[in-house]
Amino acid sequence: MTNLIEDNEATRQRVWFITDADCPYGFTLTQKVLSEGGFVLAVSAQPERLRTKLSGYEHALVCIGMDTSKPASVTAAVQTAISCFGQIDVLVNNTAVCGLTGAVETTGDSEVRRIFDVNLFGMLNVTRTILPCMRDRRQGHVINVSAMPEQGTSGLYNAARRAIDGVSEALSHELEATGIQVTIVAVGNAQNLQQNGWQGAVDATLQLVDATKPPLRLVLGQKTYERTLSCLEKAQTEMRNWARISLSSDRAA
C-alpha cells in the first residue's frame, strides 16, 4: 500500500492507531485528529461504513477490520499502519466493552474468560505488537481506555477493567527509560460527561498527548471523577482506621 505521508518529520503530525473507532469516543477522537491534520489507522467493525462517514480525509485515514483475539490479524493491521504512515505515535486501546452482569459466585468460567479475552487480552495483543515500533523510535504514547468503577452486580467486569489498570502501571515502569508514555484514561458514558459529551473527553485526550509529562491516570467526566475520588477516599479511610494493626505487624511478637 502506498505511503500516505511523504515526509512525516516535516509535517510534525502524529499518527494514531485507534481501536473500536465505531464507538462514540473512538469516532469523535478519530474525527478530531483528522480535522487537526493528524493521521489515523482506525480499527472498525465496519471499515467501509466508517470510511464513508469520514469522507474527505482519504489522504490521512485508513480504516481496517481487526480481530484482537487473533495475533495474525493484529500483526496485519499494524503492518498496514507502518506501510501507509511509516510510524505509530499514539496507540489508543479503546477496547470494545464486553459487559457482564451477575454475581461472582454464579458466573461460569466461559463467561469469565470471554470478558477477559475482550477487555484485557485483546488490548495486550495490540500493545505488544505496536510497542517494538515505538521502541525503535524511542517515543510514543499508549493510551488504555478504562472505565469508571461500577457498583452492583458487575464484579467480574470490574476485575477485567482493573486488570487493564494493573498492566498499564507495569508498562509505565517498564517503559520509563524509553521515552514511551503510558496513560490510563477512565471514561464514563455520555451522560457522565455532562453537556460537552464526547467532544470534551476527546479534547482532554488531545491535551494529554500534548503534555510534556502526561499522568499515569486521567479521569474524564464529573461523575467519573467524583466516583473515583470517593473510592480512593474510602480506601484511605479504611487504611487509617486499621493503621494500628497494620503497623503492629512490623513488631516482633
Image (cartoon, rainbow, N blue to C red):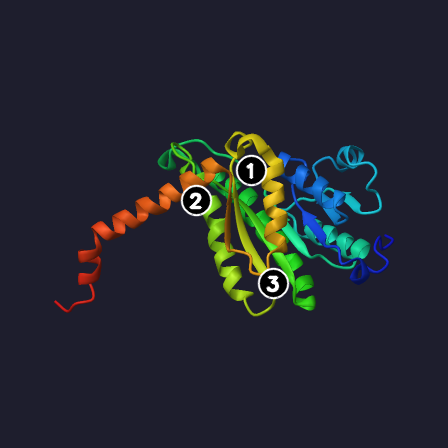
Residue furthest to the left:
253
Residue 194 at x, y percent in the picture? 53, 31
Please give the count of numbered marks on the rendered protein: 3
Q: Could you classify mark 2 by the number of other residues whose Cα lies within 10 Å: few (under 14), some (14-19), or many (20 or more)?
A: some
What residue type is disc 2 on? Answer: Ala
Residue 178 location in percent, x, y?
A: 60, 68
> What residue type is disc 3 on?
Ile
Q: Pick whichever, 25 or 120, lies toward us.
A: 25
Q: Determine whether label 3 and label 1 are within 8 Å by CB.
A: no
Residue closer to the observer: 79 or 208: 208
- Three-letter code, disc 1: Val
Residue 215, compared with residue 193, is above or below; it is below
Disc 3: CA contacts within 10 A as few (<14), some (14-19) or many (>=20): many
What secondary structure is found at the residue carrying circle 2? helix
Q: Which of marks 3 and 1 is in front?
A: 3
Task: Give the residue number, with chain letter if any, for mark 2.
Answer: 159
Determine whether 213 is above or below 205 in the image: below
Q: Name the residue under label 3.
A: 180
Residue drawn 65% across and 60% down? 140
Q: Which residue is drawn at 30% across and 50% down?
A: 236
Residue indicated by mark 1? 97
Q: Distance between the residues labelled 1 and 2?
A: 13 Å
Q: Is mark 1 on a helix, strand or loop?
A: loop
Marks 2/3: CA distance?
26 Å
Quarter of image, res 47: top right
Specify whether 156 is left or right of 57.
Answer: left
Q: How far apart are marks 3 and 1 (CA)?
A: 26 Å
**Residue 3, percent from left and from top:** 85, 55
Residue 34 position within the rendered picture, expressed as x and y whole percent measured from the top left: 75, 44
